[in-house]
Amino acid sequence: MYNTSFIKKILIVATVVLLYSCDKDFNAIGDDLIGDNHFGLTPENYDVLAYNQEVTPIQSNGLPINALGIYDNPVFGTTTANYNTQVALSEYAPTIGDAPEIESVVLSVPYFSHITAADPKGGSVYALDSIFGDPKGKIKLSVYESGVQTRASYFDTGNQLAQLYYTDENANFDNFKKTLLNDGKASENTEFFFDAAQKIDSTVDATTKKVTVTYSAPEMRLHLNNAFFQAKILNAPASKLSSADVFQEYFRGLYFKVEKSGSNTSNMALIDFAKSGKITIKYKARTAITTDPEATMEDKTLVLTLTGSTVNLLQDAKNAVYDNAIKNPNVTEGDDRLYLKGGQGSVAVIDLFDKTDLIGYNSDGVLQNAPNGVSDALDEIRNNVTTKKWLVNEANLVFYIDSDNMSKADPVTKLLADEPKRVYLYDLTNNLPLIDYSDGTSGVLTPTDPKSTKYVFGGIIDIDATTKRGKTYKVRITNHVRNLVKDATAVNVKLGLAVTQDISIIASNKLKAKNSVISEAPRGSVISPVGTILYGGKSSAGDKKLKLEIYYTKPN
């Protein structure tokens, strides 16, 4: 008979050994660096070198979302956003029918919106999202047949290369524009506005005469020139409608041009043209039913989609203070203020530690009074972790917003500048995300808000409860700092900070003319029309000065 007391003792010993082994394995993998909660510890603060960098003309074709309109930003200046897109037949080699007679041509593009209430008369009440500037603003919107044949790629010395188009190429598209297509009522042309009202459509059954009413979300609706589409599409030779390549050469697309609408204030919207944008041609043609009289006409529809090669064309009139700040950065000592702006705007360049290099430590932790190619601040951190057994618990960059400058109102509308909801910190040297972005620990802050993903990584604006304006952006770089500390061969790469319209977009777009600092900028920044001003590492703003804060656990 077994001695149960003895067995219990054996099990206890085995469990202890197993747990000890697991703990040893964990510590070996973690390299004596503990978790992400700082448990109220006081951080050590380190100086950060940060300066501005202008984003010169940048690739803007193939963006997932595009800007259209004029945004008078009281802090940064005025941005004008035009747009060019190819169009495609929903079905090539269509059967047009005999003797077609056009009835209507309507361009429709849904806006970003959300429901705010039920409409007592039916349907819903909506509010538009991604509108910048005066919500009641108007613009002159002209839609032309494009004269520029854009393309996705080209061949050079036998190699297929991506065709790039840049933000500063508006003159080329404007010079080659052709027929004006939306030459109807003022609300669709000279006094166009982004209308938040739901769309209400009714149809009448030909037999029962019953009226059916449908409600849909807000969208751009423009009635286009019937005569143009009668000639260009319905009366076109069949060969011109036979394939995508032939059609895109024949009908090169649409050019959306915006201008000021008299003395009206203006605004700008972000729009997904390609997702649901279309041109619907309704017409009549002779019936194909042989038993009907020859003159019998039937209703027909032909749809063109706003898909294919696209380019967002941006023109900036920067104010003098902003323009001077990004054109004359202090790359040696850093800048007092950091200006971030999307589009053809600006980013900040960040060196986590200052460039002072007078000392180093050998493998035994003995001070060496000689430069070693590593920042002295990083040398101190590595020595504290290696010889004093400090544990890096958490590391953050906290960017304080210059609320005084960001609170300057537009002199006409009295509106304040729109603030970016998010900033994106990345490896600027290699134009890649940081390990903290990709580590898989960053969840969703608000399940209903897709832009709140990666919230542990951070960069989300912190709003002051009283002023309803932004206070800070905090970005966690714990794992990035741990890697620098653990690996003496790790390169302290330059970091970039940019506004972003979508934190999930990590690709970069190329600058037309790269320089010694940047050759690309985040695509999410190119999409965004807004900006912010942050205190830099050189700032005299006291506690708001940019610093790297590291929380340590220190042995007793």
Image (tube, rainbow, N blue to C red):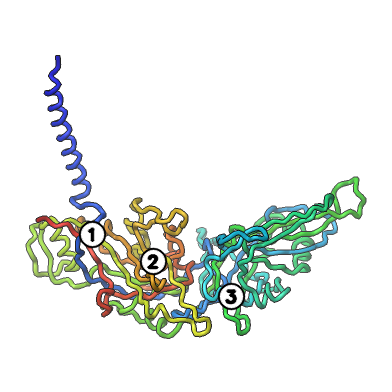
Numbered tag placed on residue 484 in the rendering: 1
- CA gap, disc 3 to disc 2? 26 Å
**How many other residues sit within 10 Å of disc 3, few (<14), some (14-19) or many (≥20)?**
few
- CA gap, disc 1 to disc 2? 27 Å
Q: Amino acid at mark 2?
A: Ile
Q: Is residue 134 left or right of residue 385?
A: right
At horizontal 11% and vertical 55% (from top left) the residue drawn is: 555
Quadrant occupied by the N terminus: top left
Q: Earlier in the sequence, mark 1 or mark 3?
A: 3
Q: Secondary structure at mark 1?
A: helix
User: What residue is shown with label 3?
Assistant: 136
Q: Earlier in the sequence, mark 3 or mark 2?
A: 3
- CA gap, disc 1 to disc 3? 51 Å
User: What residue is shown with label 2?
Assistant: 461
Q: Amino acid at mark 3?
A: Lys
- Dots 3, 2 in contact, CB < 8 A: no
Q: Earlier in the sequence, mark 1 or mark 2?
A: 2
x, y percentage for residue 536? Answer: 30, 75
Q: Is residue 304 left or right of residue 210?
A: left
Name of the residue lying farthest toward the right: 293
